Amino acid sequence: MENRLRFPPAVVDAVIAAKTARRRDDFIIGYRLSPEEPQENGITMTDTFALADTLKARALQYLHVSLWDFHKKARRGADSCRSRLDLIHERIGGACPLIGVGNLFTADDALNVLDTGWVEFVGMGKAVLINSDFATLIYQGREADIATEIDSSHADRCGCPRSKAGKMMGNRWMQVDGLM
């Protein structure tokens, strides 16, 4: 575990030093992590807490927790009745804003997860891949127009080249109407 914890803070410290040397106060520094791995020797919540303790002592502007599902509960090393994001939010204790992601597709999804109090920001990766105009749709009050799947007959809706859309449609993590 000790060896696992050396690299991340060394990278963060080097980036902070470069920011300081270049007098770039406007440069935002954050850290993205996956809190757990399913393998027997994989990362546990205990490991993640140790990393969070190390990172919260540094001048980060955010901590981004990458999850398949925002509400996923802890597997090992913490209370398995609580969500990973809730546990991490509690652990960092406001040292920096927390960004959460995971299976969120609509404006209501974003509002609902903000209401949990576990995060200060919400990432909407798949939603934006499907709706390149996601923020505009919300701003214009057109939440009903937000697609939650790529329609295989209208793959160009996502606003990316056909070759990329084809690759997205071939991945199990992207919902494709009529294909999955």
Image (tube, rainbow, N blue to C red):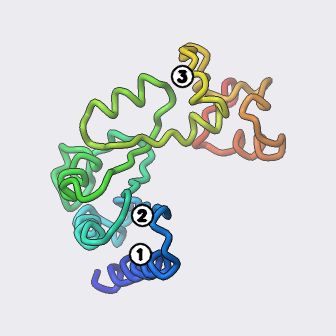
Percent from the top left, x then y, of residue 89? 24, 51
| Circle 3 residue | 138
Percent from the top left, x then y, of residue 67? 42, 49
Q: Amino acid at mark 2?
A: Tyr
Residue at the (60%, 26%) spot, across then down: 136
* Residue 145 placement: quadrant: top right
- Give the CA separation, mark 1 to mark 3: 34 Å
Q: How many marks?
A: 3
Percent from the top left, x then y, of residue 29? 44, 64
- Would you place residue 25 above or below residue 168 in this image? below
| Circle 2 residue | 31
- Give the CA separation, mark 1 to mark 2: 8 Å
Residue at the (31%, 43%) spot, across then down: 119
SS for dot 2: strand
- Disc 1 and disc 3 in contact, CB within 8 angstroms: no
Mark 2 neighbour density, 10 Å: few (under 14) some (14–19) many (20 or more)? some
Q: Amino acid at mark 3?
A: Ile
| Circle 1 residue | 12
- Quadrant for the N terminus, please: bottom left
- Disc 1 and disc 2 in contact, CB within 8 angstroms: yes
Q: Is residue 14 found left or right of 36 in the rendered image?
A: right
Residue at the (47%, 76%) spot, across then down: 15
Mark 3 or 2, nearer chain start: 2
